[in-house]
Image: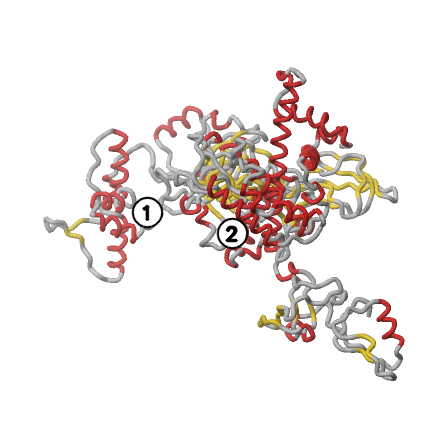
């Protein structure tokens, strides 16, 4: 009974005296007194949440009122709200505590794995959360994985359960750690080898590459992550990169959700990925004889064979482009009528000419890369090969793809867009300290889509980056707006302290007449000063020299003390409401002083400066109205002077081209952005001439067929509406299925002659023939009442002889013959 609150008065049945009154929390003494009354069989207490975990099936769950996991409770497990929110079947309502049967264990249990990876999911519209969940699956593994600085705590679990990372099955010591394997000496003396996958191709043509996370001599426990995969960092899911983003319009470059990226991201290979494509060719047994994989290919010059070995297979390491031969193959073809020249050659040399055609595997149009692997399968070694296949060669080609215009990017909140421009780093907007922005997003993409989570992630990401921690904000139970404001305040303070330290460092260099040429940059000067300033105060000199995070935290703590503040309250080991309020107060006060507000001026004295300090030094809960008044006065000062308050998360940005500050303050922070598997290199396509459909004689469609762009019925209407008669005629004839006209036009262009008038499109001939097949006598008559013949033989006679065919097969179709 200890700690429970009574739901009714408890009386002694013998004497009638009241032992304990209702709504009283029972102490150990009162609990013992009640327990001593033997006639009391049961005591009614206020409902509380017990520690038992019970698993319910769907039917039982529907019948029971269940409270939300985030319902506030006191220390004893009683509900703080008089009518907590509950769900039952499909109904959501408020219910009295005594009618509630169960409570959810965790707020995360109501969403799936991918949704649980979205920070601030509760601030996103449902449709955008769905897009965010789906687009995480489309993220391309990058060369340099970067775990999100703002996560939800599910990243490690998702990565380990995916099977992509290598996990220790037993405790032991790492006795061998190399690129291809890890050997662990287990506690029972046995050794276990964990092989690592290197540059394997995934089904999405991305690269799977495992890298060790431990070193030789490290001790590991059961479940320790031994090796990362392509999309993990230190065992945590790392699908994108943490980049500096700004929400602003920039020269129209982010119109319609387009994204502007800095050239720095491209140069530093931040979003570079490796893609591996496989190409296969089979040598089959045909009716005319077996196909042969060989280097001896008819009508192919020596230059095209330069990368092939003696067997006709390309060598590993060769750089290849579209149309290059990967595997040489010849296919026998039937006996044909010999030309007089061939008859003469055969009569002279007395040998039968080889009747074979070139059916080599060529790299398809639009592809490039380096050959990284070759596998040869023969029937002797692989009995399960398909019938008729004697030999198969598989060539793997890898390519590094950098971020480029047209690639699709997205955040975790459904905020997707296409890169419109890669901007030179010197043209990007920059912060007050000169740091250029990495990515510019359109602010108009936020209010209409109602995915505010991206803005909160940006703010918390900035604070986490400046303070040097990784933020964990679980779904429905994450950081609140006030907490983010407090972290932003601390982030501004640590930057101010660091800036002050830098100035003091250079002053110290000048004072001590140290040779400044021997110092590389600010970091060298700061290190010397920090050692001189902080080592006597008990800080570790080695950590101060090598660990930036440690040095910044130490500098902030001592800087606050030197200015008369309670450093332990500003940056406490465990946060509290009082410490958050104090951090905001100190930040705003220092901000006002930094921007020229005098300490004895009216603005600071009017807002009860001293009472705030007195309240917080005593560790009491601050009266919120005091801080509100202080922040309101600071906001007024901000509006007058044009400098953004630290707690707003906005910053003054400067134009990279002119150096002038922008009129409005801009939201700037760190957010995780993903590169999605919709790359422009896979989609871009252009055709000059290519294959045509046999029936309609119109160009084929689609990139795989090396096809043309469809000019459909509605596009015809558009040209008709504009009255563009000649353009329309050209589209429907010589650019499509006027078989005579297109060849003559090609000839005229090559020779520089005038292009002749178009002829009759093939589709019209097909229509006439179809109508004739329905027993309709259809004839085409010209203006002279002459019947126009639509037979194909006539067309062939009228065609000029160019020496080659315009019906060029694509590399893909040639390899599949």
Q: Does residue 109 appear left or right of residue 244 in this picture?
A: right
On the image, the x and y values in percent for residue 757 come to 19, 40
Q: Is residue 378 visible?
A: no
- Estimate the x, y position of residue 244 in percent, counting from the top left: 54, 39
Where on the picture, by quarter, is residue 236?
Answer: top right
Query: Which residue occupies the foreground of this view, 506 or 685?
Result: 506
Disc 1 versus disc 2: distance between alpha carbons? 40 Å
1 vs 2, front mark:
2
Mark nearer the N terminus (1 vs 2)? 2
- Tag 1, which secondary structure? loop
Tell me if mark 1 has few (under 14), some (14-19) or many (20+) residues whose alpha carbon lies within 10 angstroms of its own: many
Q: Which of 576/157 is in front?
A: 576
> Which sits in the foreground, 126 or 530?
530
Question: Which corner quadrant of the image does residue 466 belong to?
Answer: top right
Left or right of residue 363: residue 528? right
Q: Secondary structure at mark 2?
A: loop
Question: What residue does disc 1 label?
Answer: 698
Where does the image place residue 84, in percent across and percent down from the top left?
64, 69
Residue placed under numbered mark 2 in the picture: 414
Residue 631 visible in the displayed image = yes
User: Which residue is depicted at the point 30% across and 45% down?
Assistant: 736
- Where is residue 278? Give x, y as percent: 55, 41
- Residue at the spot x=70%, y=37% of the render? 561
**Left or right: 210 with respect to 778?**
right
- In depth, the one of 575 and 10 nearer the eye is 10
Quadrant occupied by the N terminus: bottom right
- Numbered disc total: 2
């Amino acid at each position: 009974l200890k700690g429970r609150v009574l739901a009714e008065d408890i009386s002694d049945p013998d004497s009638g005296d009241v032992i304990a009154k209702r709504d009283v929390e029972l102490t150990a003494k009162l609990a013992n007194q009640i327990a001593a009354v033997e006639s009391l069989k049961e005591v009614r207490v206020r409902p509380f949440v017990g520690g038992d975990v019970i698993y319910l099936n769907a039917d039982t769950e529907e019948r029971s009122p269940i409270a939300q996991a985030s319902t506030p409770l006191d220390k004893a497990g009683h509900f703080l709200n008089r009518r907590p929110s509950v769900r039952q079947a499909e109904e959501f309502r408020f219910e009295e505590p005594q009618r509630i049967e169960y409570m959810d264990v965790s707020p995360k249990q109501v969403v799936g794995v991918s949704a649980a990876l979205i920070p601030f999911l509760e601030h996103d519209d449902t449709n955008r959360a769905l897009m965010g969940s789906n687009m995480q699956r489309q993220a391309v593994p990058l060369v340099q994985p970067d775990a999100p600085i703002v996560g939800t705590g599910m990243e490690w679990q998702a990565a380990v359960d995916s099977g992509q990372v290598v996990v220790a099955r037993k405790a032991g010591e790492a006795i061998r750690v190399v690129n291809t394997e890890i050997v662990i000496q287990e506690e029972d003396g046995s050794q276990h080898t964990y092989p690592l996958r290197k540059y394997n191709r995934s089904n999405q043509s991305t690269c799977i590459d495992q890298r060790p996370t431990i070193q030789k001599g490290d001790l590991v426990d059961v479940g320790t992550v031994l090796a990362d995969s392509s999309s993990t960092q230190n065992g945590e899911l790392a699908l994108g990169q943490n980049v500096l983003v700004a929400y602003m319009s920039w020269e129209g470059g982010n119109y319609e959700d387009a994204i502007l990226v800095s050239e720095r991201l491209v140069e530093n290979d931040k979003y570079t990925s490796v893609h591996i494509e496989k190409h296969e060719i089979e040598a089959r047994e045909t009716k005319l004889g077996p196909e042969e994989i060989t280097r001896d290919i008819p009508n192919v010059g020596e230059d095209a064979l330069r990368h092939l070995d003696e067997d006709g297979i390309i060598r590993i390491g060769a750089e290849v482009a579209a149309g290059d031969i990967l595997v040489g193959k010849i296919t026998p073809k039937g006996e044909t009528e010999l030309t007089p020249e061939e008859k003469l050659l055969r009569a002279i040399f007395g040998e039968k000419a080889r009747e074979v055609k070139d059916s080599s595997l060529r790299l398809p149009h639009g592809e490039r890369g380096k050959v990284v692997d070759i596998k040869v399968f023969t029937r002797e070694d692989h009995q399960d090969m398909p019938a008729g296949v004697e030999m198969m060669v598989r060539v793997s080609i890898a390519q590094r793809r950098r971020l480029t215009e047209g690639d699709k990017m997205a955040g975790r909140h459904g905020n997707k867009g296409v890169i419109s421009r890669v901007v030179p780093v010197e043209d990007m907007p920059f912060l007050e300290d000169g740091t250029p922005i990495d990515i510019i997003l359109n602010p108009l993409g936020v209010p209409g889509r109602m995915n505010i989570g991206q803005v909160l992630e940006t703010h918390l990401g900035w604070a986490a980056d400046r303070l040097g921690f990784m933020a964990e904000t679980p779904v429905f139970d994450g950081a609140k707006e006030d907490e983010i404001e407090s972290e932003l305040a601390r982030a501004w303070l640590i930057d101010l302290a660091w800036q002050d330290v830098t100035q003091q460092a250079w002053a110290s260099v000048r004072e001590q007449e140290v040779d400044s040429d021997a110092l590389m940059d600010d970091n060298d000067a700061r290190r010397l000063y920090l050692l001189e300033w902080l080592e006597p105060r008990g800080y570790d000199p080695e950590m101060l020299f090598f660990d930036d995070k440690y040095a910044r935290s130490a500098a902030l703590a001592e800087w606050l003390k030197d200015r008369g503040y309670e450093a332990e309250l500003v940056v406490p080991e465990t946060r509290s409401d009082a410490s958050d309020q104090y951090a905001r107060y100190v930040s705003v006060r220092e901000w006002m002083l930094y921007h020229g507000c005098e300490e004895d001026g009216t603005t600071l004295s009017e807002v009860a400066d001293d009472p705030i300090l007195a309240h917080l030094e005593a560790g009491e809960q601050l009266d919120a109205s005091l801080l509100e008044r202080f922040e309101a006065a600071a906001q007024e000062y901000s509006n007058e002077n044009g400098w953004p308050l630290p707690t707003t998360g906005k910053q003054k940005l400067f134009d990279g081209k002119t150096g002038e500050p922008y009129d409005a303050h801009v939201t700037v922070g760190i957010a995780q952005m993903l590169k999605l598997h919709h790359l422009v290199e896979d989609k871009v396509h252009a055709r000059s001439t290519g294959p045509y459909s046999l029936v309609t004689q119109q160009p084929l469609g689609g990139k795989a067929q090396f096809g043309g762009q469809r000019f459909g019925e509605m596009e015809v209407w558009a040209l008709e509406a504009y009255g563009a008669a000649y353009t329309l005629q050209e589209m429907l004839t010589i650019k499509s299925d006027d078989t005579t006209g297109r060849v003559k036009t090609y000839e005229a262009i090559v020779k520089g002659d005038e292009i002749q008038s178009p002829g009759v499109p093939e589709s019209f001939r097909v229509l006439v023939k179809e109508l004739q097949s329905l027993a309709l006598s259809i004839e085409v008559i010209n203006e002279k009442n002459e019947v126009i013949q639509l037979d194909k033989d006539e067309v062939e006679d009228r065609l000029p002889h160019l020496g080659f065919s315009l019906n060029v097969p694509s590399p893909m179709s040639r390899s599949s013959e």
